[in-house]
Amino acid sequence: MLAAVDWHILWQRIFHPDHVFVLALWRTIYISVSAQVLGVVLGLIAALARMSRIAPLRWLSGLYVLIFRGTPVIVQIFFVYFGANLLFGFTLIPNSVNFGLFTMDGAAFAGIVALGINEGAYMREIIRAGIDAVDKGQMEAARSLGMTYRKAMRRIVLPQATRFIVPPLGNEFNNMMKTSSLVFFIGVTELFGDAEIRYSTTFKPVEYFLAVAFWYLVLTSVWSVIQAQIERKLAVSERGDELSFRERVFQAWAPVAAWGRGAR
Amino acid sequence: MSSNGFVMSAQDVHKRFGRLEVLKGVSLNVSRGEVVCVIGPSGSGKTTFIRCINHLEKIDGGRIEVNGHLIGYRERSGKLVEDTEPSIARQRAEIGMVFQRFNLFPHKTALQNITEAPIQVRGVPKGQATKEGEALLARVGLAEKRDVYPGKLSGGQQQRVAIARALAMKPALLLFDEVTSALDPEMIGEVLDVMKGLATDFQTTMIVVTHEMGFAREAADRVVMMDDGQIIEEGTPEHFFLEPREERTKQFLSKILI
């Protein structure tokens, strides 16, 4: 069985990727990052709307989550890209979007918008839970000092909520990098699309999909490391601990060392 | 200073949580520089009452004025309507509050806790706020803890920083909500000492919800006994120690003065 695998192709895909592949990798990265950023922004707005005193804002926020968490992302992507055109006969997303400094492929832009809106629905819950997890006394203390709700939220509550938001946010972004492969279905050649195209011209699915799995694994692993760093930073500022990296490693291994001594 | 001369004036304040009426018409006037201790069994409404003074709780009846300004409400054609948020925030800036559980901002250093509101609310330049903040830290005996985060401070130290934080806004009135109740016994003294200093050396107007009768005896001008949502007895600390009038006061005092 394994003999059927063309190891050379796999090797090439992993160690000598060509520039077409690198471009596809770059697309996956910028689509995921932009969509996640959009998702966090929308999620924050929706979370604040959910806690608003104005009832229609709360309803709107609920409707948003209901719709975008309750329908498949792929359907949402199709609707954003084709929907306006088919329904109302105008082009919502042009073929290429000009941002001044650079232009972006229209389909990629539509993908970012759709993935971002979908992500926002999930981020709303995460951000709301994070805000809820901050001790109520913090808001009271801030307001007793004369801060308005907005200022207290921005300066006191949200910075503390971040610590509760980042771990699930990391999960979300990990998911996002993989889910972004769906934009291939509106014609964006990102990592998955690149593999799909090559396999359909070479009929070597195993090699190309193994390689693409490897690259997704690289992306998610790099992110895990970054996320751990961010969480460590947040924990430090919260506790006021100033442990060095070496002390941390030592602390992490201390139980193992103790166990080792016990075993002897 | 208001026309009637009181820093804080509460008249017939009512407050209910659902069906439960926790304040049943509380009236209290506090003059400038006066230290008033509010005592009473738990559930008597004393904490709720001082939380109403800076509008952390809305009141259902009566009125509260601080420096002659109606708190939390605005009079519109004879009726009281709740004030706008920025206006309430401005009023709160004049009323300092120290909480039972300190509520320091854990993501900010001791100094940043103190300078945050002056910079963000009053627009004091950072350099000046820092200088004043350092002076306040020194006053509560924590000058060397300037750059330490609350998580690294003891309960007593945290509460002293919290007092300094409230003082940084130069409030006309300071509210203390059972500020020593969450402290280990050996740390209560250091916090009370700071409060005594404020009362005697700085003539700060203070309303102190407390069970510390020792503090009341040394620093209070007046003691107010609350029970069941009402003020049932008022007098000098001596009055309460020597000849409390009400039966419920006697019972309560016999429990806390062992």
Image (tube, coloured by chain):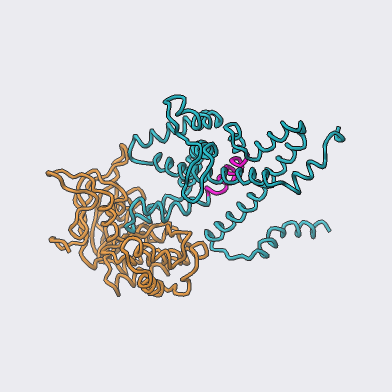
Chain colours: A cyan, B orange
Residue B3 x, y percent position in the rendering? 12, 61
Going by the picture, which residue comes out furthest to the top?
A87
Q: How many numbered circles are shown?
A: 0
Q: Which residues are magenta?
A: A164-179
Front residue of A101/B185: it is A101
Q: Name the residue rendered at 77%, 33% in the picture.
A: A204
Residue toward you, A199 or A146: A199
> Does residue A169 show up magenta in the picture?
yes
Find residue B230 and report its horizontal and vertical position in percent.
Answer: 25, 49
Left/right placement of residue A102 relative to residue B246 reads right
Query: Vertical placement of B225 versus A103: above or below?
Result: below
Q: Is residue B95 visible?
A: yes
- Front-lying residue, B47 or B257: B47
Main secondary structure along the magenta-highlighted residues: helix
Q: Is residue A153 magenta?
A: no
Q: Quadrant of the C terminus of chain A?
A: bottom right
Measuring from the top left, give residue A237's x and y in whole percent. 53, 60
Residue visible at 53% across and 49% down in the picture = A164
Where the N terminus of chain A falls, by quadrant? top right
The percent position of residue A173, horizontal first and vertical second, equals 58, 44
